[in-house]
Amino acid sequence: MNRRVYLDHNASTPVHPEVVEAMLPYFAERFGNPSSVHAFGREAREGLETAREQIAHFLRVGKEEIVFTSGGTESDNMAVKGVAMARGRGHIITSRIEHHAVLRTCESLETLGFEVTYLPVDGHGMVDPDEVRRHLRPDTILVSVMHANSEVGTLEPVREIGHVARERGVPFHVDAVQTFGKVPIDLDGASIDLLSFSSHKIYGPKGVAGLFIRRGTKMVSVQHGGEHERRRRAGTENVAGIVGFGKAVEVRARDMADEAVRVTALRNRLWEGIRARVPEVRLNGHPTERLPGTCNMCFRNVESESIVLGLDLAGIGVSAGSACTSGNVEPSYVLVAMGVPVDWAMGSVRCSLGRSTTAEDIDYVIEVTAPLVEKLRSLSPASV
Amino acid sequence: MYSPTLIDHFRNPRNAGMMRDPDGVGEGEYEACMDLARFYLRVRDGRVVEARFQTYGCGPTIAASSAGTELAAGQRLEDLAALPEARVEAAVGGLPGERRHAAEVVALAIRAAARDALRRLETARGLEKA
C-alpha cells in the first residue's frame, strides 16, 4: 500500500477535528433558522453571531463589517459587482492573474459597459503599485488585486496598492482567499475596503466564506430575497458551516504563526530536494514573498497531467498548472502572464503543503518524483 | 476515471524508445494540447513485426501509445494506414470524453508510419525494376 500524501491544500483542506466538534450540535440540536424569533432560532442565531465575533476579532474589525457568503467565489462576485452596480458605470483596475471569480466577473461587467484594465505582472507574478497609480482615472470605481495567487503563491504588495487607491479615494478589494489564516492581514494598514476570505482553505467546512465590507463602502446587494446579513446578502445562513468557520479561525489564530514557519521549511525542503535530483526544473513565484506552503514547479519537456497521474498512482495528490480538457489545453494563464515559456509552462505542477505535511512526506514525494520525471522524459521525442 | 488497462500501460509502457533503421516513421500531434506521438515500424512481408513509440503528452496519450504498439504488431500496413481511432481507444479500455484526443494522436501517428512504410516499399520496388 502506498503512503498517502496530500499536497493540494490550496485546493481544499481537511476539516479540523475541533471544527467538526463545534459544528455537530448545529445539525440536529440547534437547527433552527436564525431568522426565527423562537428559542430554536435564537440558539442558531447565537452560534452564528459568535462565529461572526470570532472572525471580526481575528481581523480586528467591527462585527457588523463581516458578511457571510457561500464561498470565496460568491464573496468576489459580491465585492466587485456590488461596488460596480452601486455606481452604474465606471472603470475597474485588476490584474491578469486574479482568480476566475474576479476575472469572469469583470468580463461580465465589461458586457454591461464597464471598462476594465487588467494589469500585467512581472516574472514572479507581482503587480507593480506604480502601474496601479498610472492607470487610475477620474472614473475608476474599484481596484481589485488578490493578496496571494493560488497557483504560484506570490504575495502581492497590497499595502502599497492600498495606499495608491486610498490617495484617490477608490475602494480597494483584496481577494484573500489564499492568505486569510495563513499570513497576517492588516486591513487598516493596507487601506483595504473589501476582503474576500474562505473557510475550506483553513481547515473549515466548504460552502461558507466571508466578505469584509468597511463601514461606509458604497455597494448594493447582488443576491436579493430577504433581510439577512443586514440586508446585504439574502438567504438563510449556513449556520453549522459558519459556526465551523468561526472555530477554524479561532484555531488558526492559535496555530498560524508556528505553522507558517514549519510549512515554509518543508516547502523549501521539497524544492531543494527536487532541484538536486531533477534537471531542467524551475520554481515559479517569488522566492521569498510567497505563501508558506506553495511550491509551483515547471518540469521541462514533460506534460503536467502525466506527472500528476504518476504521483496520484503513488498516493500523492498535487495539482496541475494546466488542464487538458476536451482538446483545449492551455498552459496556466498565470504562468503565461508571468512570461514562462510554453514548453516549461505545459509541465507545471503545484504542490501546496499544510497542517498534516511531514518531512517524511516531503522526502517520499522527492523519491517518487525524480524517477517519474526521468521516466516520462525518456518516453518523449524531445529526449533524443 | 481511467480503466485498469490504461493505468497498466501508463505505469508499464511497452515498446518505448527509438528504433534503429525503422522501415516506417510517423507522427501524430494534437495541436490544441501539444500532445505528440511518434511511431517506428519494423516491417516484413508487408506486416509489422515490431512497433515502438516516443510520446510527449498526458497520461492517456502515453498509455494509448504503448497500447498502440501492441495493436500494430502483426498487422498489414494497408490496414494500419486506415486505422480507426476507436480501435486505439478500445486497446486502452476506453477513454473519458475529455481525453479522446489520446486515441486520435496515436491513430494519426500509426497511420502516418504505415503510409511512410508503404511509400518506402513502393520506392524500393521502383528501384528494383529500374
Image: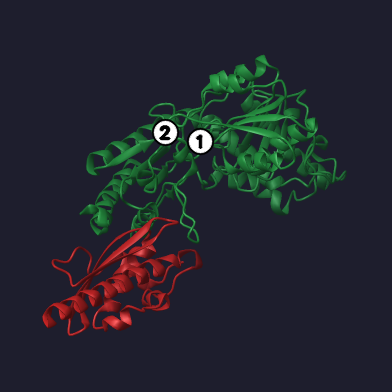
Q: Nearer the viewer, residue A114 or B23?
A: B23
Quadrant housing the C terminus of chain A: bottom left
Q: Chain of mark 2?
A: A
Is A164 left or right of A128, judged from the image as shown? right
Give the answer, above or below, for where B62 lies relative to A264.
Answer: below
Label 1, secondary structure: give it. loop
Q: CA distance from mark 2 to mark 1?
A: 9 Å
Query: Which numbered marker is on residue B130?
Result: none
Q: Nearer the viewer, residue A306 or A240?
A: A306
Q: Nearer the viewer, residue A271 or A29?
A: A271
Q: Is residue B26 visible?
A: yes
Quadrant housing the N terminus of chain A: bottom left
Label 2, secondary structure: give it. loop
Q: Are marks 2 and 1 in contact (CB under 8 Å)?
A: yes
Residue with the most extreme front position: B130
From the image, tell me which residue sits under label 1.
A149
**Residue at position x 56%, y 18% in the image:** A160
Give the amino acid type for the residue marked by disc 2 in the picture: Gly
Percent x, y of residue A31: 75, 51
Tell me if mark 2 has few (under 14), some (14-19) or many (20+) residues whose alpha carbon lies within 10 angstroms of its own. many
From the image, tell me which residue sits under label 2.
A285
Chain A in the picture: what colour? green
